[in-house]
Image (cartoon, rainbow, N blue to C red):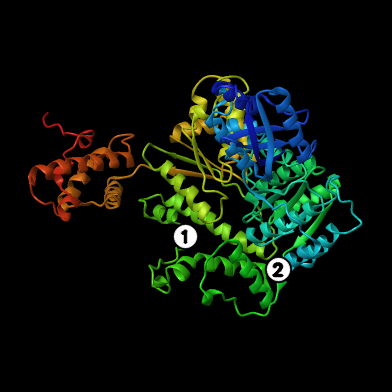
Amino acid sequence: MIYYKVKCNYTFAEELGEREQKRIWEDISTDVRFGKARNKLFVFDHDETSFDAVLMFSVKENALSSAQKSVLNEIELKHEKGICVSFSGEPEEITVEEAVELTHKGLMAGYFRSYTRGSRRHAAEYCEASYASHSDLHYDEYIMPHADFPYEEALRKTQEYLADDTMLEEIERIYSPLNKREFCGSPVHYKLNAASRETAVNLVKLLTKALYANKRVLSTRISYITDLDCDYRDELLEELCGNSYASVVAIECDDDNTDKDSFARDSERKCELICDSVREFAPQSVFILVDLGSKACKQSVQRLINKEGISFIEIFEGRGDAESGKKYLAYLLKENKVSYAEEDFVLPDQEEYSVSDIVKTYKDIKKNSIKNSIYRAYKGVETIKVEAPKSLSNGYDKLQRMVGLTEIKAIIDQIISAQKLNKARREMGLDVVASSKHMIFTGNPGSAKTTVARLLASILYDEHVLNKSKFIECGRQDLVGKYVGWTAKQVEAQFQKARGGVLFIDEAYSLVEKEGLYGDEAINTIVQMMENYRNDVIVIFAGYPDKMERFLEKNEGLRSRIAFHVDFPDYNAEELCDILKLMSKEKGYTLDEEAEKKCRIIFDCACKNAEFGNGRFVRNVLEQAIIKQSSRIVTECQNEIYDKKTISTLSASDFDINAAKTYKPTRTAIGF
């Protein structure tokens, strides 16, 4: 579909009352589907003599003039004696997003029947572009001016953008007199190699203007997909492409670290999305695959050429001397309305400049434009300097500060070391063997299993072992379905959610504790998914030691797929005291000497009981002590100013709390 913003003059018959006039507005926007070509007119504003509307029609079945004529004929036929309408001014092509916004404005203003008033989603459905109301699809839209764009102007712009010879050659082919100047489908599509989005967008716009000038497309609208997320619902991308008849669809591909095994599945998924869309809609639209260093883009082009016979032309960004580089920099600054000081208009001292070099300079000028050209008093002012972050992640530091946990700390160091070595092997062209990283954490409550799992996800992401910093926690209720056939789907859904990160299955033993086959089905599916998502998801099972052993015995393939079995032992009294000090410090408190002695006695008693809570017990003790301290200070220091040391120090009396009484000292019997 194609969308225009139009203005129409109108006159109502004198005898029509306000109610009849309102009905005519509603008829035009709600009921009228003008002709067989599905032309639509959505009114969104009016005054005494004219109204504004969105004119929408299928460019496959109609031209603008015939769509306008069809609309007027239908209005005249339906409201012969009620309203007289004529178009005025020049129609303006608009984006799908703008059409949806204006239609929504009309919905809310009452130009549609009252029962049709609703959300932006309803407006998108009226515009036959449901994808426009979904936040899952990330794209930008551009409308190029409907103006003459002669060959000489196209060549000048190509040189101004520092385009490569491949672009110049394609401009010559587009304007060649050997071509018919009419739309008959797209003979070729494009693979555009660029180092930045700014460069890519300019070249896509240039191509679109040249194609439109030669009737190779019938709309100047560009749909530029900015983020080809692997979690896309296929139908959203398909709907966007289907709504782009005789126009340009650009798909940007930018894979970070696609050489890693963990990114292989994402790359394949992106390739499938691209190939499915281009295969289906290549005859009716022009596709430009923008390669910002993407494995998926290269794979897609190869597959579409070899398997589908679809033709692609490859275009590169170019290079230029200092003079042409300055011209392109000036264009970028003017086009994006960036203010700058003349002394900042300086390129690096080199003989030749790539487009990427110019774009980098442009970004630097833009970043400092406010203080360097508008608020010049701040130019050169020394601002706060922040030290560069350490190579190891904040999560890693937190883990190292935690008490105990020697085994898991060593395992994480091993995984990080293996990652660094694998990177070196890749750079040397040597093979890298992907290893399983699935784990099982066993320990009593409060032994830090969940905390460590969360930190693990953060650490491995920061160290480039994981693709995403995802931590998905789930239990039996998230994995076992209520009915036959539901369980496998629920399990796979959790793996999809955790894709690129960590899937933490807490109390995993609960899958086998309750009777019924659904738990067995969940375990069997988990085993299968662990293999299918071997390079995409790290699975961590957690639970009590004895119960987790029975869980592992339930499926023969489960134990062999777990690389690391980490035991989280109960903390002793000394470690609990250290944990208390660490927690207190993080909250801005300290313990005096007597308080430390009293807490040691509390923790000695607690450790003699099974399942005393470990770190959770310490947290309860601290939280209750802080409440007790607040009450003590307010009582002791009535109408006095509190000093920092007083409100930051916990004394022995603050630990006379309920949690401390949970585990009482064992009394020694005296007698015979």
Q: Secondary structure at mark 1?
A: loop
Q: Position of residue 608 (x, y in %)?
A: 27, 37
| Residue situated in front as seen by the camera: 326 or 32 | 32
Q: Which residue is mark 1?
A: 392
Badges 1 and 2: C-beta atoms under 8 Å apart?
no
The mark lying in front, picked from 1 and 2, is 2
Residue at left 61%, top 35%? 527
Q: Which residue is mark 2?
A: 160
Residue at left 51%, top 73%? 341
Of pointers 1 and 2, the one earlier in the residue sequence: 2
Task: Classify mark 1: residues with Cα within 10 Å, few (<14), some (14-19) or many (20+).
Answer: few
Task: Classify mark 2: residues with Cα within 10 Å, few (<14), some (14-19) or many (20+).
Answer: some
Quarter residue 445 falls in: top left
Q: Amino acid at mark 1?
A: Leu
In the picture, the quarter occupied by the C terminus is top left
| Residue situated in front as seen by the camera: 466 or 43 | 43
Q: Amino acid at mark 2?
A: Glu
Quarter residue 85 falls in: top right
| Residue situated in front as seen by the camera: 401 or 384 | 384
Establish if 538 lies above or below 105: below
Q: Is residue 565 visible in the rendered structure shown here?
A: yes
Q: Position of residue 669 (x, y in %)?
A: 14, 31
Q: Secondary structure at mark 2?
A: helix
Q: Locate residue 56 relative to residue 633 in the image: left or right.
A: right
In the picture, the quarter occupied by the N terminus is top right
Residue at left 58%, top 19%? 483
Question: What's the distance in space between the residues labelled 1 and 2, CA to CA?
Answer: 44 Å
Residue 668's disc number: none
Q: Is residue 491 visible in the rendered structure shown here?
A: no
Q: Position of residue 632 (x, y in %)?
A: 12, 42
Q: Position of residue 238 (x, y in %)?
A: 71, 38
